[in-house]
Amino acid sequence: MNFKKLSASVALAAAAFPLSALAHVGSDGGGHHGFLSSFGHAFAHPFTGADHMAAMLAVGAWSALTVTPAWRAPAAFVALLVAGALAGFAGLWVPGVEPMIAASVLVLGLLVAVQKQMPWVLAAALAGVFAFFHGAAHGFELAADSALASAGALAGMALGSALLHVAGMVLGKVFMQRHRWLARLAGGATAVLGAAMLTRMA
């Protein structure tokens, strides 16, 4: 299997994870006591909420389509995601978490749909701001009762999120650059999800 086929398979597999549940602050609780159990649960966590997964895939796809170098916005997202999770672990209350997560899905979807270009510094800053709120939500949901379990949760969450970014970048490079209508369709669908989430909160 060549690289493009392998990359496409990875991206499609990631995109096929369940989209039925939306991740919400406080919906999952802690209780994952060991490093490995916390790692495994946190690794899967970004895939189990349509809001988180859509935003992370969108960051990767948008970066692949418009940002040079493409890895910097996803890297900023992961870094600020971890920072937000640490704030959540510490019990810091971050106002407006769910509206900001919904807004991130809407905005990132639109950026993919219109393939908006901007300097990588601005792209990384925008991705990072949104990521902090996603991280805060994860932190509240995955808060553990020991330092070892917390470290496992952070590592798993970062790795799972990075995988989604890579999947989004592959989708952007392999499919959306060749078929621009796919970017408009996927970005539009993501934006609609974000708008629906915001409407539900109104």
Image: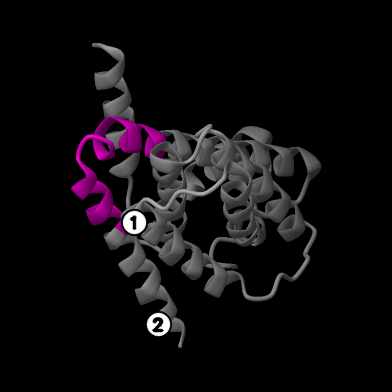
Q: Which residue does the image show at 40% across and 68% down from the upper left?
A: 194
Q: Residue at x 45, y 64 (%)?
A: 107
Q: Residue furthest bottom?
A: 202
Residue 114 bears which disc, if any?
Answer: 1
Look at the magenta stretch and give its main secondary structure: helix
Kindly identify the residue that appears in the image at 59 percent across and 55 percent down: 126
Q: Which is more toward the observer, 36 or 113?
A: 113
Q: What x and y, as percent, mark residue 67? A: 49, 40
- At mark 1, the secondary structure is helix
Q: Is residue 149 one of those drawn in magenta?
A: no
- In what quadrant of the picture does the C terminus appear? bottom left
Report, in whole angstroms, how far the alpha carbon at label 1 lies from the one at label 2. Answer: 25 Å
The residue carrying pointer 1 sits among few (fewer than 14), some (14 to 19) or many (20 or more) residues within 10 Å by Cα, namely: some
As drawn, 179 above or below 202: above
State the image coordinates of residue 163 (x, y, percent, origin top left): 47, 34
Crowdedness of circle 2 by 10 Å Cα count: few (<14), some, many (20+)? few
Q: Amino acid at mark 1?
A: Val
Indicate the quadrant where residue 98 lies. bottom right
Circle 2: residue type: Arg
Residue sitting nearer the eye, 73 or 25: 73
The answer, for residue 92, to whether it is visible in the render is: yes
The spot of residue 153 in percent (x, y) is 64, 43
- The residues colored magenta run 167-187
Q: Which residue is mark 2?
A: 200
Question: As displayed, is residue 117 above or below residue 202?
Answer: above
Label 1 with label 2: CB-CB less than 8 Å: no
Q: Is residue 157 visible?
A: no
Front residue of 109 and 21:
109
